[in-house]
Image (tube, coloured by chain):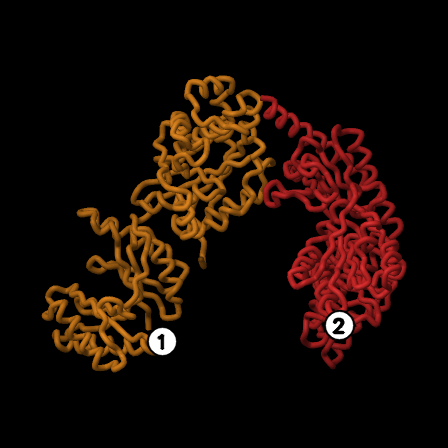
Chain colours: A red, B orange
């Protein structure tokens, strides 16, 4: 039985999305900048997709800019805000558990003089606002906090963060990386209170190579892709129209049944969690109770996550680990920041779900996992015993 | 127009009556290494090998691929001067004219200021002797290229002139080869190929002495990953640049490791596993008709490579075990790995998932009798047979474009 449980890494492209993309490549292939009818037609497709994405964010279309991926959106924000505002202040606040797209950019800015504060997280991978309050200064230029953590599935209290920011200085910019929450949580930018938001197509059944960035109207941040002035001059480069059209379609599909879809994903996730807790001893559930529907992180003590992963792949079950055996010797920075033990980090598996997963699949997964865990534990304890 | 390259044979020229055989093998290997280019001819004339290619075949590629052939000492892109039917004076004049044109190009392209001429008379019937050829060509160049001066110690350009029957050759560059002996002149061996730095170097060195190599790779899937296997295939792919096509057998050791872990002392795990690897490799080698086993072991590098450990490992098999790295330091091995292009792939960190079975304090002075006693708790014969039967064959074809 093919069971794909790595949807936080990437998702399968929906046939409808692929179809629209193919049509945009082979038939409606005009350049939106062209003056002729083909160009006008292409521009219409672009507008439609932009409106679809904007609607999902409760933003206006002119606040949405297409990029090549979540990483580009994040980098645009950090680099752009820094270049535009470094004269006003040097402090940037983020968390210790952000995606590398944020962390590596922050490190680069720190080398240029930015004063970057990494807020620690609790055992459930959220943070209490005390640390934020202590870190916020009136000359802070940017707070960037992910909406959902990709490994633990924890949900960060964005609205609360906004309130804390406003108490200090309403002019401080607030960005969120919503790559893991888009179409799984409410991402109404007004309710979240964010000025900027990054999202990515391939996590919601669109293709790889397309992302978007919401930037609140009236806000100027310096672009770093200069050229033909596409995306209102904010992101030059001929629009990736097939992928943009595909993203629009993926959003349309996801919005069509959002509530039921989320409920179904949560049900499958909860079902697996229950099964694992009932059937396999010595595990710890690392994801918080109130986390996003799509992520379940569990540590199988006395096991290596990667060995479990390779054992499961023999039965066409695909998951991911918190740490590869040796390609990332240090293990996950997220699980480390959460204060997990080495044994927990070593044995961590992330299951990430989408609407295609079923309870029946979870029965299969639990059965295979139980055997895999037992065999690995038996072997490892035999080895250690002597 | 065509490009001409002179290939010099190394040691194979010393082989007395076998010389034609070695040269024939060498021509074959060069042809094979250049087969991706159209219109290439390779032929032997009086102890030198001439490669001719159409003009549009990039010289760098030909030099790289030809110099990689084992048995090749060096390769030079050369210019040919037709002196057929000319008397010595007329021939010298023709050669001199080409030499001046050659040097003018060097001045224009590289801004050379000094030169020297080394002349050689391959055709002993040519009426002017080597030193005189050199002097007179040198004088001709000085006259034709006013900016140049002679420097016999450190010239910017060392021009070689080789006068042979009917043709003379002018060149200034020698690209070194690896020497050694042409592949296939020394049988076939089976290398135990891991994903590490050492074993590809060991395979390279044995192939360099004319031995065809086949490989056996051991993994512990799912305790190791498919990426680790891809990595070994990549390494074997790089080796094919030198060794030609490689047949690689892969064997999952996990069933044997499980037996060892459950039945034998922890500190002996590695040496016991090594002995099984050798037995399995030997069984496959015998089946395939290979003459020897080849490993990347280096004395004292790790616990399983101490002298005492090697004695115990060797005792598991009857085929001779070649260990070309035995007396090399790690840095020397790494230098070769860098040179042949396997290093970057070797250090990709996928391999050591089976550190699950790495004992904390492995034995460094194992006694054969104790190891054999531990093995008596295992059904060695059947475990080996099952592993041999389950070996999967992957053919690693010679790469193009590298």
Q: How many marks?
A: 2
Q: Is the Cβ of the residue at disc 2 closer than 8 Å to that at disc 1? A: no
Q: Position of residue A310 (x, y in %)?
A: 64, 38
Q: Quadrant of the N terminus of chain B?
A: bottom left
Compared with residue A189, is residue B116 higher up or lower down, i.e. above or below?
below
Q: Position of residue B172 (x, y in %)?
A: 28, 68
Does residue B122 appear to the left or right of B303 in the view shown? left
Is any atom of residue B306 visible in this view?
yes
Residue at 49% x, 46% y: name it. Answer: B346
Is any atom of residue A28 visible in this view?
no
Q: Dot 1: within a 10 Å radius of its alpha carbon, few (fewer than 14), some, or many (20 or more) residues?
A: few
Q: Position of residue A142 (x, y in %)?
A: 78, 62
Compared with residue B112, is residue B69 higher up or lower down, i.e. above or below?
above
> Is label 2 in a helix, a strand or a loop?
helix
Residue A231 - label: 2
Does residue B186 appear to the left or right of A221 in the view shown? left
Quadrant assignment, res A272: top right
Does residue B240 appear to the left or right of B80 in the view shown? right
Quadrant assignment, res A283: top right
The chain under label 2 reads A
Q: Label 1: which residue?
A: B109
* Residue situated in front as seen by the camera: A39 or B267: B267
Residue A350 - label: none
Residue at 43% x, 47% y: name it. Answer: B334
Q: Position of residue B364 (x, y in %)?
A: 45, 27
Q: Quadrant of the C terminus of chain B?
A: bottom left
C-alpha distance separating marks 2 and 1: 48 Å
């Amino acid at each position: 039985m093919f069971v794909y449980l790595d949807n936080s890494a990437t998702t399968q492209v929906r046939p409808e999305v692929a179809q629209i993309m193919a049509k945009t490549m082979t038939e409606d292939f005009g350049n939106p900048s062209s003056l002729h009818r083909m160009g006008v037609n292409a521009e219409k497709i672009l507008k439609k997709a932009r409106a679809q994405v904007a609607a999902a964010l409760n933003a206006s279309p002119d606040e949405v800019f297409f990029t090549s991926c979540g990483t580009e959106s994040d980098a645009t924000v950090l680099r752009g805000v820094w270049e535009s505002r470094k004269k006003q202040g040097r402090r940037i606040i983020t968390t210790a558990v952000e995606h590398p797209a944020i962390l590596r950019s922050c490190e680069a800015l720190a080398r240029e003089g930015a004063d970057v504060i990494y807020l620690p997280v609790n055992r459930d991978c959220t943070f209490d606002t005390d640390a934020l309050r202590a870190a916020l200064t009136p000359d802070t230029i940017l707070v960037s906090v992910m909406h959902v953590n990709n490994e633990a599935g924890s949900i960060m209290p964005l609205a609360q963060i906004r309130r804390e920011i406003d108490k200090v200085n309403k002019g401080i910019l607030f960005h969120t990386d919503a790559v893991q929450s888009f179409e799984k949580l409410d991402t109404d930018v007004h309710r979240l209170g964010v000025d900027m938001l990054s999202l990515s197509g391939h996590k919601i059944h669109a293709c790889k190579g397309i992302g978007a960035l919401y930037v609140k109207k009236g806000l100027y941040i310096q672009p770093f892709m200069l050229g033909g002035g596409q995306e209102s001059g904010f992101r030059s480069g001929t629009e990736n129209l097939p992928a943009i059209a595909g993203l629009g379609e993926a959003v349309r599909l996801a919005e069509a049944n959002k509530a039921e879809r989320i409920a179904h994903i949560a049900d499958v996730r909860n079902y697996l969690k229950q099964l694992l807790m009932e059937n396999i001893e010595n595990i710890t559930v690392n994801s918080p109770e109130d986390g996003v529907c799509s992520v379940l992180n569990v540590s199988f003590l006395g096991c290596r996550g990667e060995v479990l992963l390779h054992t499961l792949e023999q039965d066409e079950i695909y998951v991911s680990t918190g740490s590869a055996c040796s390609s990332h010797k240090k293990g996950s920075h997220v699980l480390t920041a959460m204060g997990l033990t080495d044994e927990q980090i070593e044995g961590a598996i992330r299951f990430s779900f989408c609407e295609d997963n079923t309870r029946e699949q979870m029965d299969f997964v639990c059965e295979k996992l139980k055997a895999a865990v037992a065999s690995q534990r038996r072997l490892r304890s035999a080895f250690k015993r002597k | 127009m065509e490009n001409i390259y002179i290939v010099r044979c190394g040691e194979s020229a010393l082989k007395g009556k076998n010389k034609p055989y070695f040269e024939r093998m060498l021509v074959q290997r060069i042809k094979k290494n250049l087969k991706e280019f159209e219109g290439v001819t390779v032929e032997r004339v009086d102890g030198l090998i001439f490669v001719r290619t159409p003009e549009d075949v990039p010289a760098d590629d030909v030099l790289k691929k030809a110099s990689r052939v084992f048995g090749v000492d060096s390769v030079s892109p050369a210019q040919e001067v037709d002196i057929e039917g000319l008397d010595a004076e007329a021939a010298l004049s023709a050669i001199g004219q080409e030499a001046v044109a050659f040097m003018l190009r060097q001045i224009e392209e590289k801004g050379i200021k000094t030169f020297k001429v080394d002349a050689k008379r391959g055709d002993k019937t040519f009426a002017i002797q080597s030193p005189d050829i050199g002097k007179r060509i040198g004088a001709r160049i000085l006259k034709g290229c006013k900016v140049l001066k002679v420097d016999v110690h450190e010239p910017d350009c060392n021009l070689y002139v080789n006068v042979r029957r009917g043709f003379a050759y002018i060149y200034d560059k020698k690209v070194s080869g690896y020497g050694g002996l042409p592949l296939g002149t020394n049988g076939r061996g089976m290398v135990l190929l891991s994903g590490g730095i050492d074993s590809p170097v060991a395979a390279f060195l044995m192939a360099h002495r004319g031995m065809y190599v086949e490989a056996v790779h051991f993994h512990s899937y799912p305790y190791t990953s498919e990426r680790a296997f891809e990595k070994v295939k990549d390494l074997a792919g790089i080796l094919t640049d030198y060794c030609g096509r490689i047949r690689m057998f892969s064997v999952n050791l996990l069933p044997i490791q499980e037996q060892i872990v459950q039945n034998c002392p922890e500190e002996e795990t590695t040496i016991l596993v090594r002995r099984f690897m050798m037995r399995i490799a030997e069984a496959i080698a015998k089946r395939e008709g290979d003459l020897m086993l080849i490993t990347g072991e280096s004395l004292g590098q790790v616990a399983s490579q101490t002298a005492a450990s090697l004695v115990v490992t060797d005792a598991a098999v009857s085929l001779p075990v070649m260990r070309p790295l035995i007396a090399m330091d790690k840095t020397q091995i790494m230098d070769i790995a860098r040179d042949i292009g396997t290093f970057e792939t070797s250090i990709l960190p996928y391999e050591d998932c089976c550190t699950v079975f790495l004992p904390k304090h492995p034995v460094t002075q194992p006694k054969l009798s104790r190891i054999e006693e531990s093995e008596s708790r295992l059904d060695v014969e059947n475990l080996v047979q099952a592993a041999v039967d389950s070996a999967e064959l992957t053919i690693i074809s010679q790469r193009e474009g590298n």
